[in-house]
Amino acid sequence: MNTDTPSTDDLLGAARAGDQSAFAALFERCRARLERVVRLRMDRRLQGRVDPADVVQETYLAARGKFPHHFDASGLPPFLWLRLEVGQKLVDLHRFHLGARMRAAGQEISLHRGALPQVTSVSLAEQLLGRLTTASHAAMRAELKIRVQEALNAMDPQDREVLVLRHFEELSNSEAAQVLGIKASAACNRYVRALKRLKDVFQSMPGGAEEDS
């Protein structure tokens, strides 16, 4: 009896053949990353009111009914397709709760692939500080947060989006390029440029800011 864990391709093939348990297993492999997408991109006014896990579960129920026809039509890898589905669910949630207060500009660059809510510089700065610094003094941390936000706001929007896609959503360089509709070499260059901008900010602080080990 073969007890090996099925590969993603095996699950995808079975799911496309109508195996609902295979689709559930495929979705489960993406669940943690999809929750991270929701947590990053959810409007701050909804944080604490809406559980990202609930948004992802609702996405699963909706996507299950669309698969495989909508997936095949998209031409996307499984995670990128599910990411779009969770993004649409998040956009619908923002419209329902925020309505006219939802900023029209709060969309990511990849409009040709469907817009997801943009990660704000405030949320992104908080995520970066949580991962990249051991600064413990409140004043130093507050100053660093402001500096990081300023650096993020000064970045080209695509540079900032590549940073989110690569560093937090854990997309490969080729996946990030596909999402943004740019060449892989351009995505790589933008990611390196964004990292350098942030590194300069951290190193300019008194004593330098060290990464967590």
Image (tube, helix red, strand yellow):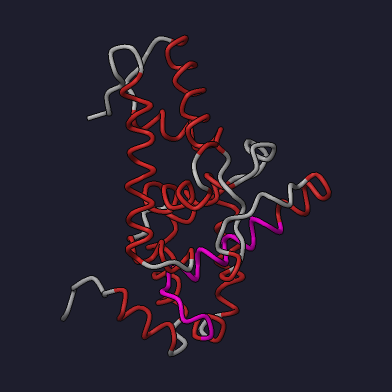
Does 74 lie within the magenta span? Answer: yes
In percent of the image, x 16 and y 81: which residue is there? 1
Q: Quadrant of the rendered structure where residue 57 is? A: bottom right
The residue lying toward the viewer, choosing from 186 and 19, is 186
Name the dominant secondary structure of the magenta segment: helix
Q: Position of residue 108 (x, y in %)?
A: 58, 55
Range drawn in magenta? 73-92
The residue lying toward the viewer, choosing from 56 and 110, is 110
Q: Position of residue 196 (x, y in %)?
A: 33, 38
In percent of the image, x 36 and y 45: which residue is there? 193
Q: How many marks?
A: 0
The C terminus: image quadrant: top left
Left or right, residue 122 beside residue 105: left
Q: Is 46 situated above or below 93?
A: above
The residue lying toward the viewer, choosing from 22 and 178, is 178
The residue lying toward the viewer, choosing from 180 and 154, is 154
In percent of the image, x 38 and y 65: which residue is there? 175
Q: Quadrant of the rendered structure where residue 8 is? A: bottom left
- Residue sticking out furthest to the left: 1
Q: Position of residue 207 (x, y in %)?
A: 28, 13
Does 77 lie within the magenta span? Answer: yes
